[in-house]
Every structure is written in C-alpha cells, then in structure tokens.
Image (spheres, rainbow, N blue to C red):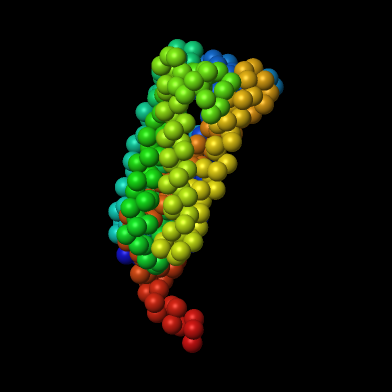
Amino acid sequence: MRRPGPGFRLLVGSTALVAWVLVAVGGLVRVSESGLGCPDWPLCDGRVVPTGQKEPIIEYTHRFVAATVIVLLLVSTIWAYRRHRDRRDVAAALTAALALVPAQAVLGAIVVWLELPGEIVGVHFMVGLMFLSLCVYAAAAAWRGAGDVSPSYRSVAVVAAAAGLLLVSLGASVVATDAMHGCGTEWPGCDGGVVGDDRFGVLQVVHRTVGYAVFGLALALLVLALRRRGPLLAGIAPAVFAALQIPFGIGIVLSGHDTAWHDAFRVLHVAGSGAVWASLVAVFAVVMTPATTTEVVAGSEPVPVSSARVAAVR
C-alpha cells in the first residue's frame, strides 16, 4: 500500500485539525448562548459581516470555521481521487465526511430557525463529531507508516473506539436534555447518593462511568505503546487527552451554575471530548490500515520505503 506524499498528508491533517476547531468553537457557541447571535441563515442579521456585538461574532466565527473546513475537505477529496485512487480507505472517509456537510448545514439552519431546541442541538453535536471522526480517520490512514501492530494493541484500540463512540453518544444526550446538572454540585456522588433520583442523574452517572472506562482503556493503550506493541504517539495521545478531560467534567459539576468557571469548564469539556474522540479514531484508523510499503513523492514514481532506507544507510 502506498503512503501519500507529505503535501497530501499535511492537507488532510490540517482538515482534521480545523474540524476539531469547529467542534471547540461549537462548544463556545452553545455555552455563550450565541446560537441565535445570527437570527437568520446564511446571512447574519441580514448582513454578510455581523455587527460588533459578542454573540454575532462568535456565531459568525463558527460559520467561518465551518466554511474553511469544507473548502479544505473538498480540496482533499479531489486530490485523493486524482492522485491517490489506490488509497480507497482515505478517499472513502473523505467522501463520507463531504456527504455529511449538507445534512449538518440543514441541522444548523433548523437550530437557528427553531431557536435552539435541545434534541436538534444534540443531533447537530453528534453529527459534528461523526464529521470529525471521518476527517481524522482519513488523516490517520494517510499518515500510517510501516510499523507493526500487535494483536493486543489492535484489540484494545478497537474496544476503546467503541467505548468512545458510546461516550460521545451519551454526551450528546446530556447536551440534548441539559443533564449536566442532574447530580447537582456533587462528585463523585450524585444528589446525595450513588445515582440521582431522576433520569437526568442516572444519565449523568452513566456518562461518568463510561468516561472512566474510556480512560482505563486509554491507559492500557499507553502501556502497550510504551512496550512498543504499536505506534507510540498514537498510543499516548488518548491517555493524555482523557486525563485532561476528566478534570474538566468534574469542574463543570463542582463550579456550580451560572459562574464564569462553570462556563469555562463547559467549553473546555466540549473541546476535550472532541480531542479524546479524535485520538481514539486515529488509533483505530492506524490499527485497521495495513502498513505502508511505498511513499509517493511528488513528481516521481513511488519509492519503496525499504529501498529508501537502504539508500539512506549507504
């Protein structure tokens, strides 16, 4: 399997990074209640450029980042089909991400038109994370090198990705139902007990529990990566991001409601959830993609990696 050249790898990597920025800015939009900062769509209060107020600027920034990632994705997809048709895994992931754009745009418009209904906001958030996962999968597959992956590393990576999908799905449910307050301001308990008295408390506790499980799986990946059973950087990233994410979630609970710290932790938690999910998808892409044996150099024929290494040694 051929490894794309550095130009293409940088492009798809940038696309994945901007897709994560989009998720983070989306969290800022929700926390700052800027979703109606531009009451119409696609314009902003009848203007192409919004006024100097905070809410329209935040919402318009979200739309600008979305437009940027769409352009990057479109260029990446065209490049993949023109120069890397043999990498169907990369092209398919980019195409699927591109197919989600119209649906996400319609959902975003509905959110504005219906004035932020919780259920639609939750679906919008989940589709955004699926869009992120496809961009990350394409980037990770394109960057896949020649290293081997042990069966244990692969098994943990697959289970961790499945647990991560469950975690972000529960997170979307928390967003849709506003269940972040289901346990009051208690941690690790919930409203005076182990589980809250209502469905919001139960949802919050289940979300926490799956989060701890994902952290445990990320630690297992870290141990395997340090033992050289799989890619080192890919194995380290989920543990680092998960370790940062847990305090953000605890901070949301302990900081109370309607405080500056509470809002800051909420924004960080959304950005962190995107980072954890993206890192798990990246590891999954690496273990599901065969090791590359050649590298495409712009303007030349593919050069076998093994031959290139021998030449470098000589």
Q: Residue at x 54, y 37 (%)?
A: 246
Picture quadrant where residue 25 is located = top right
Up/down of 292 relative to 158, above or below: below
Regarding residue 28, the answer to whether it shows in the image is no
Residue extending furthest bottom? 314
Residue 257 rendering spot, x and y as whole percentages? 62, 18
Residue extending furthest top? 114
Total count of labels:
0
Q: Residue at x 50, y 36 (%)?
A: 273
Of the pair 231 and 313, the residue shown nearer to us: 231
Up/down of 59 relative to 294, above or below: above
Picture quadrant where residue 103 is located = top left
Picture quadrant where residue 163 is located = top left
Q: Residue at x 33, y 53 (%)?
A: 155
Residue 207 rendering spot, x and y as whole percentages? 44, 29
Residue 229 rendering spot, x and y as whole percentages? 41, 63
Regarding residue 189, the answer to whether it shows in the image is yes
Q: Residue at x 39, y 30 (%)?
A: 169
Quarter of the picture holding the N terminus: bottom left
In this image, 27 relative to 300: left or right?
A: right
Up/down of 161 relative to 61, above or below: below
Of the pair 177 and 135, the residue shown nearer to us: 177
Residue 276 rendering spot, x and y as whole percentages? 49, 42
